[in-house]
Amino acid sequence: MRNKTGLFFAIVFASLALAACGDDGGGSGGECSGDILPGDLVITEVMANPAGMDTGQEWFEVYNASAAAIDLGGLTLDYHKPDGSEEHSHVMEELVVESGDYVVLGGMTPDLKPSYVDYGFGNDLGSFLNGGAVLALKCGDNVIDETTYPDAESDDGVAFGLDGNVAPNAVDNDSVDNFCPATVEFQSGMFGSPGESNEPCNLVVPGQCTQAGNMRDTVPPAAGDIVISEFLADSEGADTGKEWFEIYVAREVDLNGVTAGVEIGKPKVSIDAPECVTVPAQSYFLFAASDDMLLNGGMDNVDKTFNFTLKNGTTSTGDGLLFVGIGDTVLDQITYTDSTVAQSTALDPAMLDPTANDDPANWTLCEAPYGDETNHGTPRASNSTCSFSGMCKDGDTFRAVNPPGEGDLVISETLANPALSNTDDAQEWFEVEANADFDLNGLAFGDNVDNLTVSFTVDAVDCVSVKSGDHVLFAHGMGDLPRAPDVIIPTGFSLDNMNGNLFVLSRDVLLDALPYGTARDGKARALNPNGAAICDAEDNYAGGNFGSPGDANPASTTQCDPL
């Protein structure tokens, strides 16, 4: 019950002027204080399916529609299934509700009731049926109000309230069509307005919406118009309020009537606005568990809130599912087998298609921070700042890797047996000469006669671009080299000293191989500029090591072997 000015005097007046009465002990109402007439009290909101355990969290709300304060002492609360079975009742003790005020009655003992509940009736009414049942208020044999509340089976934590567009009355609440699910969160995971006026139910005309004050036919999305493009199912810390998903809208449509959920056939959120929710072509629309920046991780661009939970898809809990549709028609759906804490799962921006997003290979984890930077993703924006297979980061955005083709590069020199190190792989290096502009990302190298056994891959996130004429130096570190390497060779890769054959693949295609054979102590094996022979390097660059790492190879006429 919400306090109003003069409540104390109302209670005193009620205590003096109204006579208390007792419980009649049956399905009929008790002997209420004063003259309460049918319609004076109105059941306005019901929480039948709380989030988590129902026990001790169910409640319903009653409005005083009369012109005077009413003492609810002796009023009988009645509950039964729609077929009349399993009837339970409770006779209330003294409680005054003022004219135009609300009182919240809860299924818990008085000492355990939360702050938003004014009166606890314990377990006297049993457990509310999630699928809808009958609640009534009785005085003796007089039914003051009775309503059948809506089916809340698919709406965990959501109260159903009588349409707030009109003043509560005992006629409107006779129809479940005049109740609608709450969208305002009054505590974590719970939606409703206990003790307050209800939200207006949207006055939606199917197939129409209001634009600039005028009604028009909606332009609904069809197959191919909507694509689920990104989602965050597992946020940093508690998931509450931080989960979200995004849809890409291919052409300009109205999203009125669009639904979404995590179980086909059971939508849990619907865009039921009377105004036209028009989304431009090639844009994004963001659904989130909360539009409060303090709760949702700092997002200020939420378009629509939802009140369900995205499954953290793992092998132990089963695959996650998400769908978007209109009416009973599913326009797009995805399943996912895993999710990563604090990182969204994002669709390749080149694959914005409701068929392409069925392929897990077209999704990746997104490392771009947003909002308060505790989580990562691109909510309501292009996924171009996320990394995908076949893409690399060029400045602030990702682009497709520009791979070399056959003839675009040559392995031009390699030092497999350095003279200045007890451990060869600490000083080993090799060089690639570029004959075209390309990216090194994705190139795979190995040192084996089969030209197939890959030892390492250039898997940098940033684009590693080279220009035609560059001599790209690969090494384990600076060592005694005259300049820093362009690419660091990972630990564990070692060039063979016998029967050496260094090769490079691009997307499983062999681009080049350098069969350098037996490594020379301290001398690189280098291609002659004409590419017809491999020779022992003659230029000393440090101590006992010879070669031209990172530079063009000089011509040589001694110690050369034809290729």
Image (tube, rainbow, N blue to C red):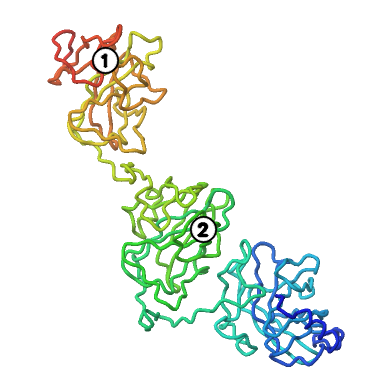
**Quadrant occupied by the N terminus:** bottom right
Between residues 406 and 426, which one lies in front from this camera angle? 426
**Residue visible at 37% across and 50% down in the picture:** 362
Numbered circle sitting on residue 517 = 1
Disc ID at residue 337: none
Q: Is 143 rendered above or below residue 336? A: below
Tell me which corner region of the image, top left, top right, bottom left or bottom right, holds residue 198: bottom right
In terms of sequence position, does the residue under pointer 2 or pointer 1 come before the other?
2
Q: Residues within 10 Å of mark 1 (few under 14, many from 20)?
A: some
The kind of residue tagged 2 is Met
The C terminus lies in quadrant:
top left
Task: Residue 19: give x, y in percent of width and height.
Answer: 86, 88
Question: Looking at the image, do the residues carrying marks 2 and 1 touch, with CB atoms under 8 Å apart?
Answer: no
Residue 63 image-quadrant placement: bottom right
Residue 380 horizontal/vertical position (percent): 40, 58
Q: Is residue 480 left or right of residue 437?
A: right
Q: CA distance from mark 2 to mark 1?
A: 64 Å
The x and y percentages for residue 163 are 57, 81
Amino acid type at mark 1 = Gly
Q: Residue at x 17, y 28 (%)?
A: 469
- Mark 2, residues whose alpha carbon is within 10 Å: few (<14), some, or many (≥20)? some
Q: Secondary structure at mark 2?
A: loop
In this rendering, position of residue 157 left or right of residue 222: right
Query: Residue 13's x, y, as percent?
Result: 81, 86
Observer-side mark, 2 or 1, equals 2
Q: Say which of 198 and 531 sits in front.
A: 198
In the picture, measured across the screen, residue 117 lies left or right of residue 263, that is right
What residue is disc 2 on?
293
